[in-house]
């Protein structure tokens, strides 16, 4: 079953715990990627981990929580293919799915209480993307970013590094770069 990744900083920890309980009650599997203590941490560290999992396809949906949700959404949206929507109300959560096909829901743990968060998460999970004209608009958002290309190449390299010789790896890396750049040309 698909697992939903979730992470927060210290300011989002309490709401993260509530959201994990909600997801479990809904029968969904959750991958909790931290933080798991009240110690102060830096939200980008967690935002990057989750965004990279969306880029690599390890998770297709994720939830991020920090104090306002702003830092997490700025971080996650630096990756091509990540559509992180900061939704501190359920209307935005619904529209972020219908029109933006958001794959990361971001909530402000210091903005939203548990009851509203529950509504936001439920609406977000239950709403489908409308496609059509909105799909065309999404294509216009995504352009290759350096960090996304590097991450894709490194992921492919790491998968194979114990299996093949260095010259083969070097060729694979070059082919990966060519393929990514070629995809980008086709998208244009
Ligand atoms: C942490 O104090 C706070 O800055 C962080 O959780 C978040 O709100 C950043 O955008």
Image (spheres, rainbow, N blue to C red):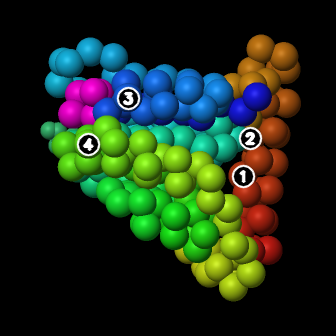
Q: What stretch is highlighted in magenta?
A: 10-14
Mark 4 surroundings: few (<14), some (14-19) or many (≥20) residues within 10 A: some
Q: Is residue 131 left or right of residue 65?
A: right
Is 13 drawn above or below residue 63 in the view shown?
A: above
Is 21 drawn above or below residue 45 in the view shown?
A: above
Mark 1 touching mark 2, by CB under 8 A?
yes
Mark 2 and mark 3: span between their CA atoms?
42 Å
Mark 4 and mark 2: span between their CA atoms?
46 Å
Query: Quadrant of residue 70 in the image?
Result: bottom left
Q: Dot 3 lies on which element?
A: helix
Residue 122 locus on image (x, y percent): 52, 47
Q: Which of marks 4 and 2 is nearer the N terminus?
A: 4
Q: Dot 2 lies on which element?
A: helix
Please say whether residue 122 is one of the residues in the magenta stretch.
Answer: no
Query: Quadrant of residue 44 in the image?
Result: top left
Mark 4 and mark 3: span between their CA atoms?
10 Å
Which of the numbered marks, if any, corresponds to residue 173?
Answer: 2
Residue annotated with mark 3: 18
Q: Residue furthest bottom?
A: 133
Magenta span: predominant SS is: helix
Q: Which of marks 2 and 3 is nearer the N terminus?
A: 3
Please identify, in this view, whether the residue under mark 2 or under mark 3 is nearer the observer: 3
Residue lying at 71% horizontally and 68% vertically, measured from the top left: 184
Mark 4 touching mark 1, by CB under 8 A?
no
Q: In this view, does 44 lie to the left or right of 97?
A: left
Residue annotated with mark 4: 113
Residue annotated with mark 1: 177
Please identify, in this view, whether the residue under mark 4 or under mark 1 is nearer the observer: 4
Q: In this view, does 182 lie to the left or right of 149?
A: right
Mark 4 and mark 1: span between their CA atoms?
44 Å
């Amino acid at each position: 079953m698909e697992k939903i990744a979730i992470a927060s900083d210290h300011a989002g920890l309490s709401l993260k715990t509530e959201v994990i309980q909600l997801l479990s009650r809904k029968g969904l599997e959750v991958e909790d990627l931290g933080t798991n203590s009240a110690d102060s941490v830096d939200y980008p560290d967690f935002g990057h981990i989750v965004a990279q999992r969306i880029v690599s396809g390890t998770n297709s949906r994720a939830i991020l929580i920090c104090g306002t949700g702003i830092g997490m959404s700025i971080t996650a949206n630096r990756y091509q293919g990540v559509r992180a929507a900061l939704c501190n109300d359920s209307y935005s959560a619904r529209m972020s799915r219908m029109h933006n096909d958001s794959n990361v829901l971001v909530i402000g743990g210091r903005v939203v209480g548990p009851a509203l968060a529950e509504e936001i998460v439920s609406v977000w999970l239950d709403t489908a993307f409308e496609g059509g004209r909105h799909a065309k608009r999404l294509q216009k958002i995504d352009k290759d970013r350096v960090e996304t290309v590097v991450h894709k190449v490194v992921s492919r390299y790491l998968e194979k590094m114990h299996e093949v010789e260095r010259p083969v790896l070097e060729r694979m890396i070059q082919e990966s770069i060519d393929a990514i750049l070629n995809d980008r040309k086709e998208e244009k």
